[in-house]
Amino acid sequence: MPVPLAPEVLANPIGVIVDLVAAREPNLDRTVIEATVTGVAGGRAKRRGMAQALLEKPVLLADGRSPAPRGVGDLLIALREAGAMEVSPPVCAECGKPLRTLQRRGQDWYCGVCGPRRDACAACGKVRPVNCRDRDGNPRCAHCPPDAGRDPVDIVVGVVTGVDSTLSADVVAAAVRATVPGAGRRYQLAWAVQDRPELLTGAGAEAPVLAVLRLVDKLRDAGAQAIVRPSCPGCDRVIHLHRRIDGQWLCRNCVAKSRAQPCSRCGVVREAATRDEHGQPLCPNCMITDPANQETCLDCGRRRPVNVRTAEGRSAAAACHTRP
C-alpha cells in the first residue's frame, strides 16, 4: 500500500523542498534554490516523492546518505553545482565517498567502484564485478565471456545476413551497436535471434527481449527487405509495441485494455492512471480533477487541473493557456 503523503506535500511539494533546503542553506538565494529544485523535480509524482522523502528525513541534506529516491541524489548534486556549501553531496552507501555522479542499487547510491555487483564467476570462480551472464543466467567476469569469447555482434550479423542477404555486415553491426550499447544485453539479443531467426521476419512480438524489436526497426530504417516489423497480437496492427504482457509484446492501446479495471471513484473501466492513498485505482479523469492534484494557475490564481507548465515549472489551466 502506498505511504500516505503529508498534506503539505500534496498541496505544494516544490515549496516543501525549497523551505527545507533554504533552512539548511540560508546563504543561497531562494530564487536559485527554487530554480534548481524545479529543474530536477520533474512531474507531480516525482516532486511528491522527493518532498516526502526530505520531509521524513531532512538529515539527507546534511549527510547525503541513502536510502532515498534517485531524484533526491540528483537534487543534492544540482544544489552543489549551484553553489550550496552546507548541503552535502550524495555519498557512497558503502565507502562514504562524496559523489558527483551516482549509480543505483535499489534505494541506495554508490560510487563507480562500489556500485557494480560482485559475484563468483561461473567460469573461473573468482569474485569479481559481473560483466554479463551466460545462457543459464550465471555470472561471468570480464575475463571469462560466454560462448568462448565470440563477439555477440558477429552472431547477430551472421543470423541477419542469413535472413536478408541485401544487408551488408557493416550495416548490421552498426545497427546492433546502436540498438544495444552494453555487452551483456548484446549477448541476450544474439541468443534470442540465434535460437529463433523468425523473430526477425514477423514473429517479433514473441521476442524475449526488447532489443529484438529495436533491432528490427533499425534494420528496416537501413533498407532491409526481408526483415519484417511485427504486428500487435491484440489488434493485428503493425504499430510500435509498448510492453510485454504474458509473453507477448502489445501496442499501447492493447496494454491499456489488458489493464482496465473499475475506477474506485467513478466506476468507469479504464487503465488506472494512479492510485489513491489507500491503493485503489483512479482513472485519468478522476486523477486530474482530484483537488489534491490541482495547482494554482499562474494566470487566474485559481486551483484547477494543470494543462501546461512554463519553462520555470509553474502551472497554467486549460482555459488560461493560449497556444503560441
Image (cartoon, grey):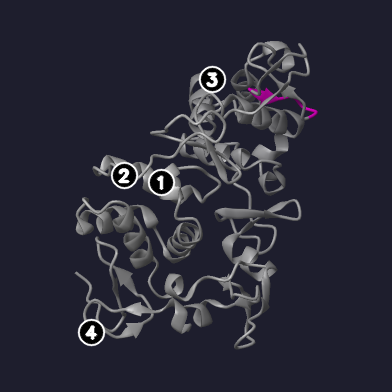
Which of the two labelled residues, at mark 4 and mark 2, occupies the earlier sequence position?
2
Report the residue marked by disc 3: 169
Label 4 amino acid?
Answer: Cys
Q: How crowded is mark 4: few (under 14 residues within 10 Å), some or many (20 or more)?
A: few
Q: In which quarter of the image is residue 26?
A: bottom left
- Work out whether 189 lies above or below 170: below
Q: Which contiguous range is marked in magenta?
A: 131-136
Report the residue marked by disc 2: 86
| Front-most of residues 253 and 237 | 253
Mark 4 vs 3: CB contact within 8 A:
no
Label 1 amino acid?
Answer: Ala
Label 3 amino acid?
Answer: Ala
Please tell me whether mark 1 sits on a helix, a strand or a loop. helix
Label 2 amino acid?
Answer: Glu
Q: Can residue 98 be seen in this view?
A: yes
Residue 45 in the image: x percent, y percent? Answer: 48, 64
Q: Distance between the residues labelled 1 and 3?
A: 54 Å
- Residue 85 within the segment the image draws in magenta: no
The dot on residue 62 is: 1
